[in-house]
Amino acid sequence: MKKIFLLLLMILTVSGCGGASQEKTSTAPEKNQPTTQARSADKKILVVYFSRTGEEYNVGNITTGNTAIVADIIAKKLGADTFEVKAATPYPDAYEACTELAKRELESNARPAFAKNIDSFAQYDTIFVGYPIWWGAVPRVMMTFLEANALSGKTIVPFCTHGGSGLSGTEREIADACPNAKVLSGLAIVGKQCQNDPAAVESEVADWLKGLGY
């Protein structure tokens, strides 16, 4: 019975996994340029996201991560640049192994290393930050990225994919990591919907962006 309960808890709180182990700090990541979409000069928007491929609960193996799908929709609708945060050491492809590692990292408040960073955030006023929900929290590797960059003076717009938990209070985590940034209301998308019904996800994203004034 205990094993069944733990499995159900895992399903409800973890949507996909992602990209690195390592405790606390590590060597400085390499610099990298974001992917540029065509956009008007007055739109200084960046979509930063962490996503994962591999085994996904109730879906199977996926080649494009749930959060990556949402990030791409947002970027195309806004003509924004994109940057994918990748862990220095990839998380396991196997769903259960990934969730177990994510849980250990959360319990130890680890800060796994990320692979590359952006040269500069100076040209961006607004940054959309995307991530899967792991055990009711922002993945630790994404916290490493946010704390390393702080994003002072920026407007941050969170979005996440999840298995049933919604945003789970992660806007507060982001605000704590970036205390001098303005954090707006976020969007939560059920992870499997990204794979099974992308058109519905696109519609939900469009409505959300409209509500934000885009």
Image (tube, helix red, strand yellow):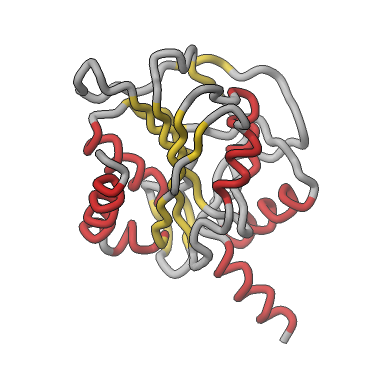
Horizontal placement of 37 versus 35: left or right? left
In the current view of this chain or complex, which residue is farthest to the bottom? 1
Residue located at (47% from left, 25% from top): 154
Does residue 88 show up? no
Q: Position of residue 80 (x, y in %)?
A: 29, 28
Quarter of the N terminus within the rendering: bottom right
Decide which of 41, 98 is in the foreground and name it.
41
Residue located at (63% from left, 59% from top): 135
Q: Classify 203 as above or below 70.
A: below
Q: Quadrant of residue 111?
A: top right
Q: Position of residue 20 (x, y in %)?
A: 63, 39
In the current view of this chain or complex, which residue is farthest to the right? 108
Q: Quadrant of residue 95?
A: bottom right
Does residue 8 show up? yes
Q: Position of residue 53 (x, y in %)?
A: 45, 48
Q: Classify 93 as above or below 122.
A: below
Q: Quadrant of residue 28?
A: top right
Q: Position of residue 158 (x, y in %)?
A: 46, 43
Horizontal placement of 138 versus 62: left or right? right
Decide which of 201, 91 is in the foreground and name it.
201
Residue located at (77% from left, 33% from top): 24
Horizontal placement of 103 versus 203: left or right? right
Horizontal placement of 186 versus 148: left or right? left
